[in-house]
Amino acid sequence: MEMAFLHYHILVILIFVLPFNAISTSDHHHRHHDHHHKHGLKSLHFALYQHETINKTGFIVVNGVAGPPVGQTTTPFGTLFVFEDPMTLTPNRTSKVVGIAEGTSVTSGLDGLRAISVAKITLRVKHYKGSISVVGVTHNIKPSDHPIVGGTGDFLFVQGYVTSSPVDLSGLTVVYKIEFHIYWPPYAIPTDSV
């Protein structure tokens, strides 16, 4: 019985004391490298601008069944939309194209403002070439975060998220600012950065 009691105390110490020691160690490491890395991971942060032109780079494939009519910021509930949009360095459509966002969305909000989106974003930026895949709910008139769920090329195994924010919702072409927050786990550091 005494031996079981001793094992119980050792187990309690292992469960409660060691995690605090690990947290304080990683917290110190995090503060030390915060301006270069988040949580000790190699990272890349930048913004591009997505230009979507109705019936040129974005198309309604299936009309929705309820809700507001099709507009610059709304589509009826259930609308299936596909796109292949250029991504530029600035909000100006004539600036350099450094990426392509291609994917689909389905209007999931009865107000016509939200859609479940899936996209593959092919990039050629800052000496990196490849694609990332994102999925999430896009709000047409508010910023939306989308988790990165995969990648190819230099972005193989990356993690992180992109934030999509409306910039210009008037006219035939709407513009969204896409902010990238990309992190490489230790086992997936790109070869050109080692």
Image (cartoon, rainbow, N blue to C red):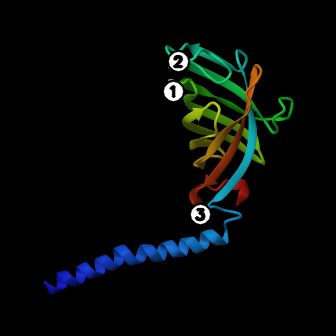
Q: Nearer the viewer, residue 70 or 106?
A: 70
Ranked by sequence position, the earlier of labels 3 and 1 is 3
Report which residue position mark 3 lands on. 39
Quick one: label 2, few (<14), some, or many (20+) residues within 10 Å?
some
Q: CA distance from mark 2 to mark 3?
A: 43 Å
Q: Quadrant of residue 61?
A: top right
Q: Secondary structure at mark 1?
A: loop
**189 sits to left or right of 108:** right
Q: Residue 184: x percent and y percent?
A: 62, 54
- Residue 116 is situated, as x and y percent measured from the top left of the image, at 53, 30
What secondary structure is marked by label 2?
Answer: loop
**Which residue is at 76% across, 19% downward?**
172
- Quadrant of the rendered structure where residue 91 is? top right
Q: Which residue is mark 2?
A: 67
In this picture, residue 93 sits left or right of residue 33 = right
The three-letter amino acid code for the residue at tag 1 is Gly
- Residue 148 lies left or right of residue 168; in this view the side is left
Kindly identify which residue carries mark 1.
Answer: 109
C-alpha distance separating marks 1 and 2: 9 Å
Q: Is residue 94 above or below residue 129?
A: above
Which residue occupies the foreground of this view, 18 or 70? 70
Query: In the rendered view of the protein, which quadrant contains the N terminus?
Result: bottom left
Measuring from the top left, give residue 175's x and y in whole percent. 74, 30
Question: Circles 1 and 2: CB distance less than 8 Å?
Answer: yes
Q: Name the residue type under label 2.
A: Gly
Q: Is residue 136 above or below residue 112?
A: below
In this rendering, the label closer to the viewer, 2 or 3: 2
